Image (cartoon, grey):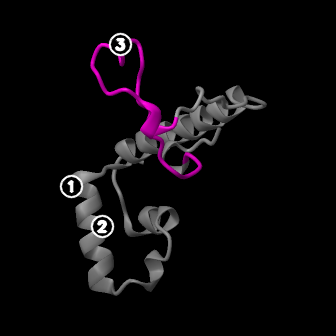
Amino acid sequence: MNHWSIESLSEKMHDFCNLSLTGQHELLEYMITYFPPQKFKQQLSMRSKALQNMENAKNTLEGATQSFPSFIEANSIDTNPESLHGFAFVLTAGGEGERLRLSL
């Protein structure tokens, strides 16, 4: 398939048949111009690889436990630059890692 047709596009697009005839033809022209079948297949392949990479990342972290550094009360810290040498401030964010598609 080197070129989209109404039939080939309707097989790949969800709910294509419910578009108006004008909408179908506009979408067909857009797809022919900007998203030919070869590009569509390439995008599907990259999507599959990305999903597999996501699963591999989840499997890599299987059984991992998250550890945290020791906690110091903020009011007990001497803010003198010399006394802060070798320390770091960690600002944590809430959530379960949804944006990265994995959770520790």
Q: Residue at x 58, y 41 (%)?
A: 51
Q: Position of residue 37 (x, y in %)?
A: 38, 48
Residue with the mark numbered 2: 28
Mark 3 neighbour class, 10 Å CA radius: few under 14, some 14 to 19, many 20 or more: few
Residue with the mark numbered 3: 85
Residue 36 sits above or below residue 12 on the image: above
Task: Mark 1 vs mark 3: give the one in front.
Answer: 3
Q: CA distance from mark 1 to mark 3?
A: 59 Å
- Which amino acid is tagged 1? Thr
Mark 2 neighbour class, 10 Å CA radius: few under 14, some 14 to 19, many 20 or more: some
Figure quadrant of the C terminus: top right
User: Which range of residues does the magenta coloring cover?
Assistant: 73-97
Comes first in the chain, label 2 or label 3: 2
> Looking at the image, which is closer to me, 53 or 85?
85
Residue with the mark numbered 1: 33
Report helix, strand or loop for mark 1: helix
Q: Position of residue 102 (x, y in %)?
A: 60, 41
Comes first in the chain, label 1 or label 2: 2
Q: Residue at x 62, y 31 (%)?
A: 57
Q: Position of residue 64 (x, y in %)?
A: 73, 29
Magenta stretch secondary structure, dominant: loop
How many marks overall?
Answer: 3
5 within the magenta span: no
Q: Position of residue 40 (x, y in %)?
A: 40, 48
Q: CA distance from mark 2 to mark 3?
A: 63 Å
